[in-house]
Image (cartoon, grey):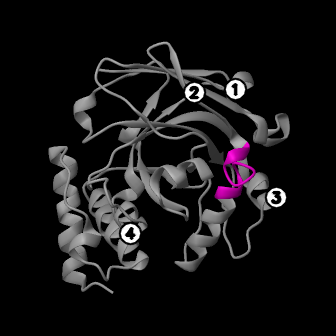
Amino acid sequence: MLHPDDIAKIAAELAEADRAHAVIPRITARYPDATVEDSYAIQGVWRDQNLAAGRTLVGRKIGLTSKAMQQATGISEPDYGVMFDDTVYASGAEIPVDLFSNVRIEVELAFVLKSPLEGPDCTLEDALAAIDYAVPALEILNSHIELEGRTIVDTIADNAAYGGMVLGETHKRPEEIDLRWVPGVLSRNGEIEETGVAAGVLGHPATGVAWLADKFHQHGARLEAGEIILAGSFTRPLWVNRGDTVHCDYGPMGVITCRFV
């Protein structure tokens, strides 16, 4: 495992890359013995420094929960990161490209919890019982680490490549809709680029919420009421540039639009 000084050094590099909208060399190229535990420790140092600076945590993102995303990244296990309130946008927003090092978009569902959820052995039924409602969401990926050759260790340390989230307006309680069959038709500048259904996320998009509760239990923590859980993409990431308009149709759960400026 990495020495605490190295963990603090890498966390500082990532914080500076975030401020400068830059990209740093792969952690695993420089520290080949770094482990997943090291990467979560790096993320934790970065998170705590942001909280100390006054940012407000509103939820967690889960990544790499679908075969589409695992194949797109070459990474075969889920990961998670944190989301701060200043990274959340409403549908229709104009989003400055200059806030990010790079921009890719994923189609997801987000869940808002009405009660705490904790492991061990959390089931899908436990997760559904703790969820207040589902809402369509687009995740903005933002990598501060070079993409080529990246591993799960690099991604986790970089807050699971989370950059932002665009939330839709339609809320559905789990009993109101079969969440497995929520569609996503993602368009850029009027042209359909990606399609998928939410069942592509571990068979049911809320399964990732149960997985995250179990992961948190390993660290002596739990998911809290009111948190937003971004459950993972059921499409491949779509590259976006300045001037692009993004539109996603979620069928019975409405649409999301945003423009990158």
- What residue do we see at 64% from left, 71% from top? 214
Q: Are discs 1 and 4 less than 8 Å apart at CB?
A: no
Q: Name the residue under label 3.
A: 125
Q: Can residue 223 be seen in this view?
A: yes
Q: What stretch is highlighted in magenta?
A: 199-208
Q: Are discs 2 and 3 less than 8 Å apart at CB?
A: no
**What is the three-letter code of the residue carrying label 2?**
Gly
In this rendering, which labeled residue sits more in front, label 4 or label 3? 4
Distance between mark 3 and mark 1 Cα atoms:
22 Å
Q: Are discs 2 and 1 less than 8 Å apart at CB?
A: yes
Q: Mark 4 points at which residue?
A: 153
Query: Of the residues under marks 2 and 1, which one precedes in the sequence?
Result: 2
- What residue do we see at 38% from left, 40% from top? 87
Label 3 residue SS: helix
Q: Mark 1 points at which residue?
A: 253
Distance between mark 4 and mark 3 Cα atoms:
30 Å
Q: In this view, does 247 lie above or below 179?
A: above
In this rendering, which labeled residue sits more in front, label 1 or label 4? 4
Q: Position of residue 223 (x, y in %)?
A: 59, 62
**What is the three-letter code of the residue carrying label 3?**
Glu
Q: Mark 2 points at which residue?
A: 168
Distance between mark 4 and mark 2 Cα atoms:
31 Å
Q: 147 or 106: nearer the eye?
A: 147
Q: Where on the picture, by quarter, is residue 225?
A: bottom right
Q: In this view, does 66 lie above or below 94?
A: below
Q: 149 left or right of 13?
A: right
Q: Position of residue 250 (x, y in %)?
A: 66, 26
Query: Of the residues under marks 1 and 4, which one precedes in the sequence?
Result: 4
Q: 129 left or right of 11?
A: right
